[in-house]
Image: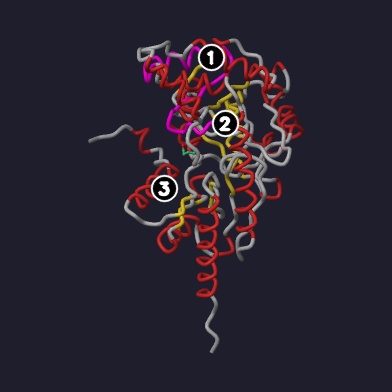
Amino acid sequence: MQLAHRVSKVTPSMTLAIDAKAKALKASGMDICSFSAGEPDFDTPEHIKAAAKQALDRGKTKYGPAAGMPELKQAIADKLASEDRLEYTADQIIVTNGGKHSLYNLMMALLDPGDEVIIPVPYWVSYPEMVKLADGEPVFVITDAANGYKITPEQLEAAITPRTKLFILNSPSNPTGMVYTPEEIRAIAEVLSHHEQVAIAADEIYKKILYDGAQHLSIGAVSAEMRSRTIISSGFAKAYAMTGWRIGYLAGPLDLIKAATKIQGHSTSNVCTFAQYGALAALTESQDCVESMRQAFAQRREVMFQRLNAIPGISCLKPDGAFYLFPNIKELGLSSLQFAEMLLEEAQVAVIPGIPFGMDTNIRLSYATDLNTIERGCDRLYTFVKNRINNQRPTVR
Ligand code: GLU
């Protein structure tokens, strides 16, 4: 069959592929330590599940408005106002099938052929692929570990051209876990204030998962002008352990949200109706679950960070958000893909190679898993690397 050209431009999602492989190996009885997908190991909190179950029992099983349930959109608007100083009306919000789908809608609504989209490297796997699916052109800016893998104002300024339509800002970051400080956000906003043709996609899905007093400042809250050009993308998966529910949202300028709603109205229609009641409970009821999961992630981060840095040939920055570590493995002399494949094969540890994030010198590990798996996985990683280093040594004659 002659497939559409657009499909040949994109690669499959490696995060999903490796996660599926790790889960299948586990299901077949193998003892796999998986640090692959960014998926909290916690079950969705009971009160959220109860709200969805009640909605089912009350017959909330019909179509709803394509852009989402009005009560949920209002609750999202209220939270953005109280937590982030971002004022939106409910009609400036669209509820989508996960954070990923919100970004896809955004790209489809905004990009024309040839529009450039600035993406700092390393990036989350799906950004460039979505840009290409929407006929845009990804423009990569390679960041430096010395800057915490964050784009500098100078790098951003240098990358902007008259064709730049969008800049993707992801903080806290997947895959690095790094968080832009409020000062850094303001410096980025200052650059963008001189280029009014550039919109900002602010992917803030990890904003509730912060450590060591790190602060999240949304770029949309810097000034009225920034807010008018920023589209917030977020979702419920990470902070509320709701990955499989598929509920995300966009908040932004009315014309963009209307355009995204038009696209959604012809593609997916509304997000699962009773699931939206679960999301409403997540936002409007106690936030204690978010904090207790965050505390567990904080403890796991500490353990995995110490363990990784104790492995010869591996060096890792300490991130202050999300639930990923992104260590450098360059010294070990393997590509990230070779490393990840051999590690899974020889040591039954699943990690994501850096290459689909645009950085072949690193690997990504998610610590959204239990401490026992983290300890066992790091033991195996240590042995794997030690064996490799020993085998690499030239033979003494
Ligand atoms: N966002 C998560 C990750 O990066 C889930 C997988 C995906 O959607 O790509 O692991």
Residue that extends furthest to the right in the rendered view of this protein: 183
Q: Which three-letter amino acid code belongs to the residue tagged 3? A: Ile
- Can the viewer see residue 48? yes
Q: Name the residue tied to disc 3.
A: 18
Q: Is residue 149 left or right of residue 15?
A: right
Mark 2 vs 3, N-terminal side = 3
- Examine the image and state in which quarter residue 347 appears: bottom left
**Residues shaded magenta:** 240-269
Q: Is residue 131 visible?
A: no
- Check disc 2 and give the amino acid type: Ile
Q: Residue at x 55, y 86 (%)?
A: 396
Q: Is residue 54 magenta?
A: no
Q: Which is more toward the observer, 218 or 108?
A: 218
Cα separation, mark 3 vs mark 1, equals 34 Å
The residue drawn where x is 69% and y is 34% is: 157
* Callout 1–callout 2 Cβ contact below 8 Å: no
Mark 2 to mark 3: distance in Å? 22 Å
Left or right: residue 173 compared with residue 56: right
Q: Is residue 250 magenta?
A: yes
Q: What residue is shown with label 2?
A: 205
Q: Position of residue 76 (x, y in %)?
A: 57, 18
Local SS, label 2: loop
Q: For disc 3, does the CB lie below 8 Å from ligand 1?
A: no
Question: Is the residue 294 above or below the residue 253 in the image?
Answer: below
> Extreme left residue here?
1
In the picture shown, does residue 6 fall above or below 394? above
Q: Is label 2 within 8 A of ligand 1 (CB to nearest ligand atom)?
A: yes
Residue shown at 50% from the left, 49% from the top: 35
Q: Amino acid at mark 1?
A: Lys
- Image mark for residue 73: 1
* 197, above or below 313, in the image: above
Quarter location, residue 265: top left
